[in-house]
Each structure stands twice: as C-alpha cells, then as structure tokens.
Amino acid sequence: MREKGLSAWLKLIIVFCGFFGLLFCIYIAPETGREILLDSGKLKPLYNPFITFIWITGIPFFTALVLGWQICSDIGSDQAFTVKNADRLKIISVLSMIEGFLYIGALLYLFVVGSYHANILVILLLILFFSVIISVFTSMLSHLVRNASEIKQDNDLTI
C-alpha cells in the first residue's frame, strides 16, 4: 500500500506542477510581459517573441511531466526500479538541459540586443538555475535507478 500512496502523492504534485505551468503560460507570463515589455517603448517589440518563447519552453516542461506521470504509475505498480524508468529519468534530464539552453539563448539575445530589464534577468537566471539543478539530479537518479534495476534483476535470478 505504501507504493500506491506514494504514487498518488507524486501524481498530485505533478498535477499541481502542470496546473501552475499552464497558469504561467496562459496568464502570468503574458501579464508580466505586458506590464514590463508593453509599458516600455524600447522593449515593446519583444512582447510577441516573448510569448512565443514561453510556449516553446513549455514543451519540454509538459513532456517531462508526462514522463514523470509514467514513472509514478510504475511506482504504484511496484515497478520503480526498471531500465525504462532510468531511461525516462535520463530523458527528463535532457529535457531540463534543453530548457536551460533555451534560457541561455534568451539571456544572450537580451544582452546582444541590449534591451533588458532587471526583473526579466532575475526570472531568466532563476529558471536557468532550476533547470540545471533538475537536470543534474535526474541524471543522478537515472544512474541510481539503472544500478538498482541491475541489482534487482540479479536478485530475481538467484531466487
């Protein structure tokens, strides 16, 4: 019963992350962009590319949530330590790094254009920081799950 409870709890967290991600893409980012970019004459042309960028960066985010949901389903069926879950964690790590590269590109673009706002830089740097942290930890988890899967297979064969 512990696995099913953990699986349900993790799925609830994923639902909240998906809800807040959707809220960010649909409302928070456009309103923040409107407030910062459209109110500034110099940054006004960046509003539509900003919204497009937010939706493009949502693709790896929501893909990672789907993969996380699949991992949670496997945890609920007592199949946590499998090569498939290790591969899913590795994909999540890559998606997070892609997200980081997208935000590095956005930072470089803002510096090259020379039209940036301190609030935008802080937000971009925070997102970049978290994407790198998530990428590192999911990569480590992938390695550990793969090793645990191999140990589990060896134990299953010896019994």
Image (cartoon, rainbow, N blue to C red):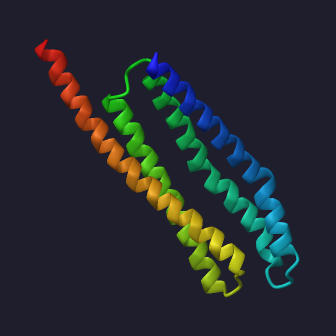
Q: Identify which residue is drawn at 61% across, 48% down.
A: 59
- Residue 89 x, y percent position in the rendering: 40, 41
Quarter of the image that includes the C terminus: top left
Front residue of this view, candidates 154 and 58: 154
**What is the tally of numbered marks visible in this picture?**
0
Residue at 49% x, 19% y is: 4
Name the residue located 14 percent from the left edge and 16 percent from the top edge: 157
Quarter of the image holding residue 105?
A: bottom right
* Image: 88 above or below 119: above
Q: Residue furthest left?
A: 158
Answer left or right for 41 relative to 125: right
Q: Position of residue 69 (x, y in %)?
A: 54, 32
Q: Nearer the viewer, residue 104 or 126?
A: 126
Where residue 113 sits: x, y (%)? 66, 85
User: Is 129 on the left-hand or right-hand side of 54?
Assistant: left
Residue that sits furthest to the front in the current view: 2
Residue 78 lies left or right of residue 72; in this view the side is left
Q: Quadrant of residue 53?
A: bottom right
Give how far across and how far down residue 117 sits, in percent: 72, 81
Q: Residue furthest top?
A: 159
Q: Name the residue located 36 percent from the left edge and 49 percent from the top edge.
A: 139
Q: Please, is residue 92 above or below residue 33 in the view?
A: above
